[in-house]
Amino acid sequence: MMTRLDIPALVLKNQDLGEGIFLLAVCAPHIASIAQPGQFCMLNAGSPGTTDPLLRRPLSIHDADGETVLFLYRVVGKGTRLLAAKRPGEEIQILGPLGHGFAGDNERKSLLVGGGLGMAPLLFLAKRRAKERTIIMLGARTSGELVCADAYRPHADELIISTEDGGLGRPGLVTAPLAERIESAARDASALQVLACGPWPMAKAVAHLCQRHEIACQVSLEARMACGTGLCLGCAVPRSGGGYLHVCTDGPVIDAALVDWERTP
């Protein structure tokens, strides 16, 4: 049985990185000590003792080290606006760590692929993997959205950046350099694994690419969820062969072969 905690965590930093993106650091040593790359937490953005907003916000763990847990998030609604207003010294109620993280094979060359804020959980993952066996590919619409790209560089044998507007790195989608690497390694596909996180169209493209070349692929799925613990069943996604998976309890990291991508958004 997985261990999870529901604790008040002290805000250490809540840095505005631009483009509506913030880096939140909290003191949560117990969560930091047991968290695995790819897991997430549910954060209560309201004031202590209030129920507004009613639901917590799910955020993937960007990094965990010592007593500190970091979250990278974008302001998109009321909950994240309240979260962005938190200042050092305030407390946030946090439930976590939740879900299943990445279970990559350390013997294989890893291609870590992140799109937009889907890059968030990949820093924690990269730090846990051997640098010389890891290539990181990060993509975004603009250079301004690649807010923490330099933090990834020390933890990879190679860092490849793509932006759709060509403002930084290669112009185009992050799936283009991924396709090139997979094509070039087609004779040795069994020695590769792809570990990805990003919006649904990117995840679907990555999954199809890996399926064509019979490459092991895990994806961290993004979904709206109310509870994060399997009670509300609001984060269901179609399962290959029928039925549904739930991102909160079956994922968020799932073997791409288990998802029926033709019935996803």
Image (spheres, grey):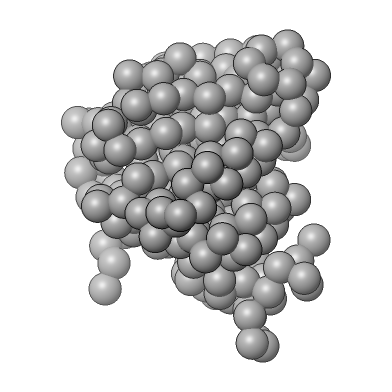
Can you give x and y, in whole percent of width and height, for residue 83 in the image? 58, 30
Residue found at the very far bottom of the displayed protein:
242
Q: Quadrant of residue 63?
A: top left
Q: Does residue 33 appear to the left or right of 17 in the view shown?
A: left
> Image quadrant of residue 90?
top left
> Toward the viewer: 223 or 125?
125
Image quadrant where one finds the N terminus: bottom left
Q: Please state, as top left, top right, bottom left or bottom right, where the C terminus lies in the image.
A: bottom right
Of the pair 17 and 5, the residue shown nearer to us = 17
Pick the residue in front: 14 or 168: 168
Counting from the top left corner in percent of width and height, residue 170 is at: 67, 20
User: Residue extending furthest front?
Assistant: 187
Q: Is residue 75 left or right of residue 228?
A: right
Picture residue at 75% right of the left edge, 28% below the top:
172
Question: Which of the pair 218/220 is nearer the observer?
Answer: 218
Residue 35 sits above or below residue 177 on the image: below
Residue drawn 45% across the image and 15% down it: 150
Kindly identify the residue that appears in the image at 46 percent across and 41 percent down. 112
Work out whether 243 lies above or below 105.
Answer: below
Count the labels in the image: 0
| x and y percentages locating residue 102 in the rendered image | 38, 55
Image location of residue 159, percent across then percent down: 46, 24
Q: Quadrant of residue 133?
A: top left
Q: Residue at x 48, y 71 (%)?
A: 250
Residue 113 visible at all:
no
156 displayed left or right of 84: left
In the image, residue 41 above or below residue 190: above
Q: From the viewer's perspective, is 61 left or right of 2?
A: right
